[in-house]
Amino acid sequence: IVREGFKYVAADFNPMYLKRVIDKAVTALVAELKKASKPTTTSKEIAQVGSISANSDETIGKLIADAMDKVGEEGVITVEDGKSLDSELDVVEGMQFDRGYLSPYFINNPE
């Protein structure tokens, strides 16, 4: 979209009009995706989506469904590399805070 947009702007197309057209297209596309989407409500459905996302690996799909059951819809799931060949689920109670700087300009002492 960006490349094609640059071509239009280079051909003297009004960039503000192009932006408005793209914004309308995005709004329409999001509405269509919401209409076509189907919410997952059961653990089995979550496992199916997880399996498909993991190249049809049913073990990973089940692990994702188990993790979702344990942390809930608003919980945080972190995937980490392991040192063994097994896939495992480890639940850690607590809170997670975003860390780091919002902008690099907030750093007043780079050391």
Image: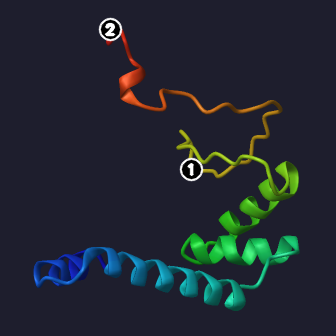
Q: Which secondary structure, mark 1?
A: loop
Quarter occupied by residue 59? bottom right
Identity, as a three-letter code, of the amino acid under mark 1: Leu
Quarter occupied by residue 96? top right
Q: Is residue 47 left or right of residue 32?
A: right
Q: Position of residue 82 (x, y in %)?
A: 56, 42
| Image quadrant containing the C terminus | top left
From the viewer's side, name the closer residue of 89 and 2.
2
- Residue displayed at 34% across by 81% down: 17
Q: Position of residue 97 (x, y in %)?
A: 67, 31
Give above or below for 44 relative to 84.
Answer: below
- Residue displayed at 11% across by 85% down: 11
The residue beneath circle 1 is: 85
Give above or below for 6 relative to 81.
Answer: below
Contact (Cβ within 8 Å) of mark 1 with mark 2: no
Give me the disc on residue 111.
2
Give above or below for 1 relative to 95.
Answer: below
Q: Position of residue 6 (x, y in %)?
A: 19, 76
Identity, as a three-letter code, of the amino acid under mark 2: Glu
